[in-house]
Image (cartoon, rainbow, N blue to C red):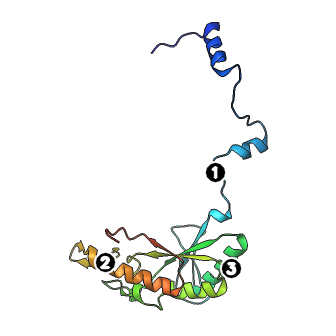
Amino acid sequence: MQSRNRTAADKADVSRITGGRRMRRNRRTDWARRMVREARLSANDLIWPLFLTEGVDVREPVTSMPGVERLSVDNAAKAAEEAVKLGIPAIALFPNTDAGLRDELGSEALNPQNLVCRACRAIKQAAPEVGIVTDVALDPYTSHGHDGVMAGATILNDETVARLVEQALVQVDAGADIIAPSDMMDGR
């Protein structure tokens, strides 16, 4: 394709089509830029992730995420209160399950007294207006670190899905408002 020099006739064609008007928004002023911007984020659009750990009054740095801490249940409840004050509508809970509570089946995920469930109840008591998002996945609870029930080197999809359903019900009973399925299992 060759470029050609624009002639007066070309310019006239453009003027004939547009009627001599250029109908674009002018973005010279702040108010105009704010009016036409594509995305407006506010605290209402945020979900605050809280990383949980056992203990009382614990704030433990997460070395792989500078500035992020694992919080004990009491501190997670305080963080939920802070979220409400900041206008953040929801929090998401992620447990750091003690290795001694992990097993091949991820049984701790089904325990109504597990870390996530205790945090849900404490948060609902401290800040009932905040939404709680919980993660349905077995990897925080399995000794092998996979998201599913294993038979040798194979993940048993149907058995895993049944456990994930039980886990979701335990979390809802504890006060979870949104179940976020990050497990990547088929058919759930």
- Give the vertical position of 43 relative to 152 (above or below): above
Relative image position of residue 35 (x, y in whole percent): 72, 45
- Give the vertical position of 19 relative to 104 (above or below): above
Residue 153 visible from this viewpoint: yes
Q: Classify the position of the C terminus by image quarter.
A: bottom left
> Would you name the residue on which mark 3 appears?
81
Report whether 35 appears left or right of 60: right
Report whether 126 appears left or right of 64: right
Residue occupying the point 43% across, 83% down: 169
Looking at this view, is 116 or 17 the one in front? 17
Tags 3 and 1 touching, CB below 8 Å: no
Say few, some or many: other residues with alpha carbon within 10 Å of mark 3 (under 14 / 14 to 19 / 20 or more): some
Looking at this view, is 99 or 164 the one in front? 164
Looking at this view, is 97 or 111 the one in front? 111
- Give the vertical position of 44 relative to 33 (above or below): below
Give the amino acid at mark 3.
Glu
In the displayed image of the protein, which residue is found farthest to the bottom? 113
Measure the C-alpha gap from mark 3 to mark 2: 35 Å
In the drawing, what numbered circle is on residue 39?
A: 1
Measure the C-alpha gap from mark 2 to mark 1: 39 Å
Q: Earlier in the sequence, mark 3 or mark 2?
A: 3
In the drawing, what numbered circle is on residue 160?
A: 2
Looking at this view, is 89 or 138 the one in front? 89
Name the image quarter holding residue 154.
Answer: bottom left
Measure the C-alpha gap from mark 3 to mark 1: 27 Å
Relative image position of residue 180 (x, y in whole percent): 47, 71
- Give the vertical position of 43 relative to 17 (above or below): below
Query: Does dot 1 land on a helix, a strand or a loop?
Result: loop
Say few, some or many: other residues with alpha carbon within 10 Å of mark 1 (under 14 / 14 to 19 / 20 or more): few
Give the amino acid at mark 1.
Ala
Residue occupying the point 67% across, 16% down: 15
